[in-house]
Image: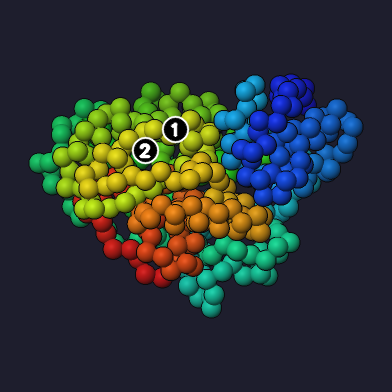
Amino acid sequence: MNESLGDLTAACIKCGFCLESCPTFRLSGNEVESPRGRINLVRAAVEGEIEWKDTQHSLDTCLGCRACETACPSGVRYGAILESSRVELRRRSHNQAYDGLLNLMTSPSALQAQLIAARLLPTTRIPRFLSKFISNDPPEADLPRVSDAYPWPPVEAKSLPPVRGEVALLEGCVMRVLYPDVNEATVRLLRRVGLRVVPVDVGCCGALHAHAGDATTASEREEAMRQLLPIDMPLVVNSAGCGSHLLETRIASQVAEISTLLVANGLHQRLQTAPGLSNTTVTYHDACHLAHGQGVRSAPRELIAAIPGVTLVELSEPDTCCGSAGTYNLTQPRRARALLDRKWENIVATGASIVATGNPGCHAWISQAAREQGRQVRIMHTLDLLESAFSGLRPEAEF
């Protein structure tokens, strides 16, 4: 591990192109909260010049957004450096309360139980007596909540093309519980281009564990998925973080990012004849692990722009992290809030009535800002927006 980690860090030529791409460096101006600074610290730890514990703060404050990889002229694999470094830190010490949080978030049944328990609390915010086990800062994130309580209307069979293929769909953990409408929209959209869906019910894919340095659990989840995944069938992933993670595993060749797959199968052409959305302004937030982790930027925009009646307005700093970043808004709430406030200012400046994005964490975090500000701005997964072009916008759930 150390030798390969040393090789990874040696690829950094210390040019500094990554600095202004890094959200945490832009907030603090502190070199140790930049990709270059973090790489220097990790390299020093690998070479024994400092203790691994001396990298803890720097690595903990990293979002893992991988914007630095997009900016880097040398192709430094910062995501691999970060995850490997967190594995090293975890070997020496880890927060058992944080492990418990990951287990709650990635177990669909446990997450469902949290939703029920949350309704009994007198506040919408995560209680301080719980958050203090994973952060020294007061909590900023609201308790989890289901996005929409209104079902999609039935699809007329005569409007669908013949089935010409099958794909598997990762139902996931957070997506399945908090945004079941997105999984249903995924199935409906794929069927609209002639693809039948085979659900893969494996729960968590291991993405959050891998990002946190829990390589053992991530590997176990990967193996469980390999056992359930139909051989040679594309695996459709509609969560940016999950897709980015799975592209680093042994099933990478089967992973199919949903918006790219839909464009390849002609959904943008079918959208042009859909009922559409009348006189609607939409902006698009690039989820970090979609834009930086997978390099997917144009496909979602092409699909949104194809919706009749929609005007797509570009967001300022569209691929700058909103601060959700998996569990970042729980472990680093102060920094996450600063990033959310900046994101929200940019959203308001577009004048859009809908914000589309492709990751459940971004969806939940930006939705919180919309509730807090009382703005008439709706946050939607890109797939919900696309299916709405065919089936109509459903009412938003009341909280």
With 157 as the anchor, is 184 left or right in this view?
A: right
**Coordinates of residue 302 in the picture (x, y in percent):** 32, 35
Q: Quadrant of the N terminus?
A: top right
With 395 as the anchor, is 98 left or right in this view?
A: right
Q: Is residue 363 above or below residue 370?
A: above
**Coordinates of residue 399 in the picture (x, y in percent):** 41, 70
> 314 or 276: which is nearer to us?
314
Residue located 41% across and 61% down the image: 146
| Residue at the outermost left position | 158
Q: Which mark is residue 259?
A: none
Q: Marks 2 and 1: in contact by CB < 8 Å?
A: yes
Residue located 67% across and 50% down the image: 27
Please indicate, yes or no, whether residue 183 appears anywhere in the rendered image: no
**Coordinates of residue 319 in the picture (x, y in percent):** 51, 41
Q: Which mark is residue 296?
A: 1
Inspect the image, locate mark 2, and give the three-letter code of the amino acid beneath it: Pro
Residue located 59% across and 40% down the image: 65
- Label 2 sits on a secondary structure element that is helix
| Residue at the outermost right position | 49
Residue located 25% across and 43% down the image: 307
Colour scheme of the picture: rainbow
**Numbered-mark total:** 2
- How packed mark 2 is, by other alpha carbons closer than 10 Å (few <14, some 14-19, many 20 or more), is many
Q: Is residue 262 above or below residue 347?
A: above
- How packed mark 1 is, by other alpha carbons closer than 10 Å (few <14, some 14-19, many 20 or more), is some
With 142 as the anchor, is 194 left or right in this view?
A: left
**Coordinates of residue 355 in the picture (x, y in percent):** 39, 52
Inspect the image, locate mark 1, and give the three-letter code of the amino acid beneath it: Val
With 56 as the anchor, is 343 left or right in this view?
A: left
Residue at which label 2 appears: 300
